[in-house]
Image (cartoon, grey):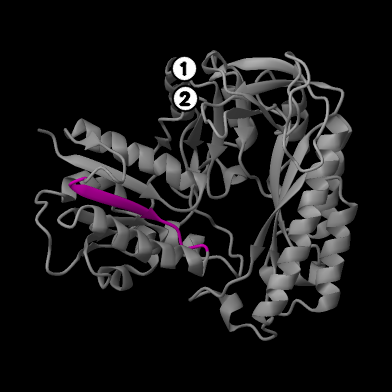
Amino acid sequence: MNKKVAFYTLGCKLNYSETSSIGRMFTQAGFDTVDFTDTPDVFVVNTCSVTENADKKCKKIVKEALKISPNAFVTIVGCYAQLKPKEIAEIPGVDMVLGAAEKFQLVDHITDLTKKPKAVIYNQPVEHANTFVPSYSFGDRTRTFLKVQDGCDYSCTFCTIPLARGASRSDTIESAVNQAREISASGVKEIVLTGVNLGDFGIRNGQREDRFYDLVKALDEVEGIERIRISSIEPNLLSDDIIEFVAQSKRFVPHFHIPLQSGSDKILGLMRRRYRRDLYASRVAKIKQVMPDCCIGVDVIVGFPGETREDFVDTYNFLNRLDISYLHVFTYSERENTPAAEMIGTVPGSTRADRSKMLHILSDKKRRAFYESQLGKNGDVLFEGDIKDGYMHGFTKNYVKVRTKFDPVLVNELKTVHLTSISPDGDVEITESEEILVH
């Protein structure tokens, strides 16, 4: 009987794509992939370390894993494993820790599944993580996360990702296109492009060889894929030619997620972001000029050191004026070995929480306004296979979430629907068979 392996992934879409690739390596080595609760012989936890909470989650997952399968071999990979391998090795029950340069050799390192009295660490300095390993997620029939870029050469003062993932490096356009064709052949209809700094695509061996714009053009020609979505792109790397190409492309959808982090130029300077808010506003205006129905998501951090009440109000008002669709709000948390952790002007935790709540309310307001702007229009929905209270959901090209009664025939199918109304409490109802309401 084959040995069984289970995976648990924390953090970003990039981690999910890498977990899938590691999973395929286990399959090739003769392992069966099972659910976390199915008493596996090996647990692989792919970690994140963007927030303090992610570190705590890792410890909790290990504890739960050993309740399920006390003799299982527990391995930890990912960003937290690169940053704090010794700390992880002290977690009771952990047998192996692999850093950024070693995680894709995990199967080679597991030669003996006997529990270890002390965790084995394979962790080189992050500078050794200098090769690009292609990855894409697999298992969701509807969409796949395709990793085309890794690492980051930026030096934002709050961020540990360059310490955890190394320098910017990318796949080749030819390889990315070939993977997209593989994904297409599997029946998946949507690809989400992912990377640490996606717009910086094209660096190999420290030299720029391609541009993200050229990758976008090449992927737009891949037959069989109905949609390609850009997961996140820095505003200073989102050029007019990319925006204009997406507006008329066959497969790229009108949806951008653009990190802002702060609407205060003072705070952007302290963060060492490579733009100021005027540039950000110009990117939003350009998108809306050529794609009026485009969905625009925004990352924003509250409570950064030195953020006064006036700075926060500046951010709030800036976001309120922008023609955007939703926010991802992050409460700043101090991270070791980052310049921001040493900055003066620490914002009290209660103040951070209050500011986060205000922006979450603003996000709800923005999303509602965006959804209302889409009422009365038709949208092509790609339905997913989930079931909740007898309903299934899907997304339009411009990321409007819709819901209908579960129908197995609709799974992974594109259906043109008429967006009619939003119920007062946010629930979705169907008034006619061909009309599916906004969620």
Pick the residue in front: 60 or 192: 60
Q: Is residue 204 visible?
A: no
In the picture as drawn, the residue positioned furthest to the bottom comes out as: 344
Q: Measuring from the top left, give residue 200's x and y in whole percent.
A: 59, 46
Looking at the rendered structure, the kind of residue marked 1 is Gly
Question: Secondary structure under badge 1?
Answer: loop
Mark 2 surroundings within 10 Å by alpha-carbon count, few (fewer than 14), some (14 through 19), many (20 or more): some
**Does 224 appear above or below 128?**
above
Image quadrant in which you'd find residue 352: bottom right
Residue visible at 54% across and 13% down in the picture: 409
Q: Is residue 207 visible?
A: yes
Check whether the beta carbons of the residues at disc 2 and disc 1 lie within 8 A of each other.
yes
Q: The N terminus lies in which quarter of the figure? A: top left
Which one is in front, 205 or 233? 233
Compared across the picture, whether 49 is left or right of 261 comes to left
Residue at 28%, 53% (x, y): give it.
102
Q: Residue at x 58, y 59 (%)?
A: 154
Towards the viewer: 142 or 338: 142
Label number found at residue 187: 1
Q: Which residue is mark 2?
A: 141
78 displayed left or right of 168 = left
Q: Residue 37: horizontal and vertical position, in percent?
A: 29, 46
Range covered by the magenta-colored residues = 40-50
Q: Nearer the viewer, mark 2 or mark 1?
A: 2
Task: Tell me which residue sits at (25%, 58%) in the image.
Answer: 67
Numbered mark located on residue 179 in the image? none
- First in residue order: circle 2 vs circle 1: 2
Let me know if residue 224 is in the magenta part: no
